[in-house]
Image (spheres, rainbow, N blue to C red):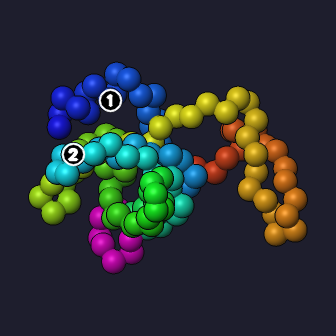
Amino acid sequence: MDELIAELKKRVDFKKTLVIGDVVLIAADDPQMLAFAVVTDISRDSSRKDEWWHVKMQMLSVPLQAMTWTLRMEQMCGLEMFTMGGKNRFMAPVRISYGDVVEKPPGKDGSQGKRNKKDLPGLRIVK
């Protein structure tokens, strides 16, 4: 798995931070797989003393599958490999270039707008 992650880091432009709406690349050791998912929500796990986050994702597969993983910042941003049920996993946000302007999600009235990438919200730690 270490070799696979090293090779992915050479070939894929990963981001350093994770925000809602990001596409993540997920690698698993058993079963062996590479898959993409889109992050739909990130919320603090208040039941734990340390900083853990519930990361809700929609797997980009047929059929679409929703899942929630509880991870630390280093795990959800691709800084470290982790295990689930004793099986190795890796997850990292992928940098996708859209140009200088991205579409805003539709408003409640259905209107569309545009905003600069720098105006997009980011994940911040609140203690």
Q: Is residue 83 left or right of residue 38?
A: left
| Figure quadrant of the N terminus | top left
Front residue of 123/19: it is 19
Q: Residue furthest bottom?
A: 47
Task: Tell me the residue at 47%/38% (across/down).
Answer: 94
**Circle 1: element type:** helix
Residue at the disc numbered 2: 32
- For discs 1 and 2, the disc positioned in front in the rendered view: 2
Residue 22 rendering spot, x and y as whole percentages: 53, 47
Q: Residue furthest front?
A: 62
The reply to whether callout 1 and callout 2 are in contact (CB within 8 Å) is no
Residue at the disc numbered 1: 8
Task: Tell me the residue at 82%/45% (across/down).
Answer: 114
Residue 10 rendering spot, x and y as whole percentages: 34, 22
**Circle 2: element type:** loop
Q: Is residue 77 above or below residue 70?
A: above
Residue 70 rendering spot, x and y as whole percentages: 33, 64
For the record, the magenta segment spans 45-52
Residue 39 rendering spot, x and y as whole percentages: 50, 56
Q: Quadrant of residue 115?
A: top right
**Magenta run includes residue 88:** no
- Please state which amino acid type lies under the numbered disc 1: Leu
